[in-house]
Amino acid sequence: LVPTLTAFSTVALLEQHFDNLVDYAFTARMEDDLDRIARGEEEAIPWLQRFYFGNGHKGLKELANANLEEIDARAINSIPLGVDSEGVPVVARTGRYGPYVQRGEQSASIPEDIAPDELTIDLAIEFLEKPSDDRQLGTDPETDLPIYVKNGRYGPYVQLGDLDDDKKVKPKTASLFKTMTVEEIDLATAQRLLSQPRLVGSDPEDSTEIFALNGRYGPYLKKGTDTRSLTEEEQIFTVTMDEALALFAQPKKRGRGAAKPPLKELGEDPNSGKPIVIKDGRFGPYVTDGETNASLRAGDTIDGVDMDRATELLAERRAKLGASPKKKPAAKKKPAAKKKPAPKKKAAPKKKPAAKKTSAEAAAADESSPSDG
């Protein structure tokens, strides 16, 4: 590992304004606390809350707020390298646009990957005295300001005018096209680049002006808050009104294309019921269940990671985040089918009561019955 100038500035900040955080006794106690958390004897989230917000002592938040006004960012960010032959101090700093060396009012960018122990006073002076790639191309006839071509952190560009001493008003700049080089650029081309954004025309339906310009992600058209991408940088100066209207008539393409398919599908998480897959991310392959992402560790391979290893990685990640997997919802039981009511039995027909015999019928019956005699 090679330390950076930013690392040196960070150490200086801690030692000068947060010395208790780099005290050996404090770090020893912290290691003991972290060991207890690793063994499951202490909860991580409450510990972090005490560290940040405090609990009977000043937390990191209160310490930072108290020291903020006392911190001299420029002094913290300055690493003395020595003095030149005339006794002028030379320092190294990290700025908004990367690391640089400074001697008085003179400064020069240095490579980001340079090791601090390689940045000697002699090398710093060499950077400072190196001829600049900046070149004045001429004077803009409309503003009477000089036009330069320069090399910047994000590539070559042209600039109209000089930077004010107070640096509050920045001069107008425009990046060179990918097909252009610093050596070939001339005054006419620079003026053309600085003329951006170019007014293409106004939409006849709503009178909104349409501009063509170059941006961070390439050339595009702008109409109010609506935009459409152009395929080539030269189209900024050649696109017609009809072509612009045709582009705005089409639906806007979202994102940078379709989502990449997963590198490997592992199956359904037995706890959450969600599919676990391995995807390719900005910092390498990782496993995810759609809610939690966990990077593969050193020694893990895409082919070697199975469901058990994936759930282990996700569990470790959830533990660090203080989260827990959402359990798979239990399947809803189907309501029991209602039994059809049994058909009602038909009531048996009531027997008619026997008709009472008349006295004559009774006498006839007696006469017809056999006698005992």
Image (tube, rainbow, N blue to C red):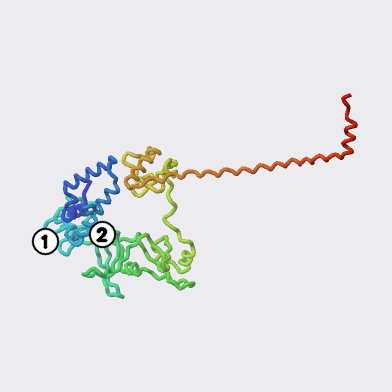
| N-terminal-most mark, 1 or 2 | 1
Q: The C terminus is located in which quarter?
A: top right
Answer whether labels 1 and 2 touch (C-beta < 8 Å). Answer: no
Given residues 295 and 25, the one toward you in this image is 25
Q: Secondary structure at mark 2?
A: loop
- Residue 37 appears left or right of 311: left
Residue at x 18% of width, y 50% of height: 22
- Residue 77 appears left or right of 46: left
Residue at x 43% of width, y 63% of height: 228
Amino acid under label 1? Val
Residue 209 in the image, given as x and y percentages of width and height:
42, 71
For residue 97, the mark is 2
Measured Cα–Cα span from mark 1 to mark 2: 24 Å
Residue 254 quadrant? bottom left
Amino acid under label 2? Tyr
Q: Secondary structure at mark 1?
A: loop
Crowding at dot 2, Cα within 10 Å, few <14 / some 14-19 / many 20+, comes out as: few
Residue 259 in the image, given as x and y percentages of width and height:
43, 51
For residue 88, the mark is 1
Residue at x 25% of width, y 54% of height: 53
Vertical placement of 75 versus 166: above or below? above
- Residue 295 appears left or right of 95: right
Q: Nearer the viewer, mark 1 or mark 2?
A: 2
Vertical placement of 253 versus 267: above or below? below
Residue 286 in the image, given as x and y percentages of width and height:
37, 45
Residue at x 70% of width, y 41% of height: 345
